[in-house]
Amino acid sequence: MISLEDAVTARLESHGARFEVLVDPDAALEIKRDEFEGDLEDVIAAEDVFENASRGDRPAENDLEDVFGTTEPIEIIPEVIKRGEIQITAEQRREMQEQKRKQLIQRIARNAVNPQMDDAPHPPDRIDNALEEAGFTVDPMEPVESQVDEALDDLRPVIPIRFDEVTVAVNVPPDHAGSAQAKIRSYGDLEREEWQPDGSWIGVLTFPAGLQNDFYDTVNEITSGEAETQIVRDEDEISTR
């Protein structure tokens, strides 16, 4: 369960009665869209249905039966969320908006590059400042994924930006191959790999272009700077980084 401080109220008024439940705001939106795949008990603040959650008042059992056909809270809670409205305070809205903004910036930074600077990644601070300059407002009630395209449309007049992927070949020497290759391959899609007779490992990965700096830093760290990396432009051309 979550704390009361992290919960919002979902409210449904039906048959002359009011029903309220306390739930995580993001989970409430997922439930409302039939996208929730987790455990309900993990995202609610109380396994209970209220008439007035702030006072702790509960509705009559016959009202629950009339509206939901059951008195079991775990069955009623999703119905209140789906059929009702999500109530958030101004402070909760501000916090949700700030959290969604950070998530949006992180997602864009992971995937976006500057086409005027040899496809170099955009630092998160630059994206944050550009969103501010563009006047883009994050909707706290919408998923981050559905706001990315609109944010990019607003960013393009402010900074050169595009979403892209990069393919990188990595040659890890024998002393580090065993421990390093597992972490390296986690960065993206492993296109191909080869174990060399001397025990070294070569992998070719494709991943969001915005992760390049993090990728190179990780490779250098876990191989003590001994690995070699090359950007793969196409099947016939490989340019050394």
Image (cartoon, rainbow, N blue to C red):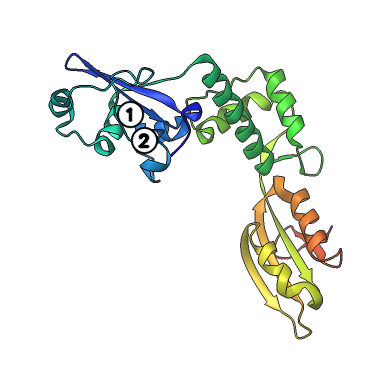
Label 2, label 1: how many angstroms apart (C-alpha)? 7 Å
Quadrant of the frame with the N terminus: top left
Is disc 2 surrounded by few (<14), some (14 to 19) or many (20+) residues within 10 Å? some
> Could you say which disc has been placed on residue 81 in the image?
1
Position of residue 46 relative to residue 8, above or below, is: below
Instruction: Tell me which residue sits at (31%, 29%) in the image.
Output: 82
Q: Horizontal and vertical percent for residue 200?
A: 77, 77
- Name, please, the residue furthest toward the bottom: 197
Q: Horizontal and vertical percent for residue 98?
A: 61, 25
Q: Horizontal and vertical percent for residue 206?
A: 65, 57
Asked if residue 154 lies left or right of residue 146, the reply is right
- Name, please, the residue furthest toward the front: 56
The answer to whether the residue labelled 2 contacts the one labelled 1, judged by CB atoms less than 8 Å apart, is yes
Q: Amino acid at mark 1?
A: Ile
Is disc 1 surrounded by few (<14), some (14 to 19) or many (20+) residues within 10 Å? many
Mark 2 falls on what kind of element?
A: helix
> Could you say which disc has been placed on residue 31 in the image?
2
- Name, please, the residue furthest toward the right: 225
Nearest to the observer: residue 48 or residue 156? 48
Q: Horizontal and vertical percent for residue 73?
A: 26, 35
Instruction: Tell me which residue sits at (86%, 67%) in the image.
Output: 226
- Snapshot quadrant of residue 234: bottom right
Mark closer to the chain start, 2 or 1: 2
Nearest to the observer: residue 101 or residue 122? 101
Instruction: Tell me which residue sits at (41%, 33%) in the image.
Output: 45
Quadrant of the frame with the C terminus: bottom right
Instruction: Tell me which residue sits at (69%, 76%) in the image.
Output: 194
Asked if residue 194 lies left or right of residue 116, the reply is left
Q: Amino acid at mark 2?
A: Ile
> Could you say which disc has been placed on residue 237 in the image?
none
Nearest to the observer: residue 14 or residue 30? 14
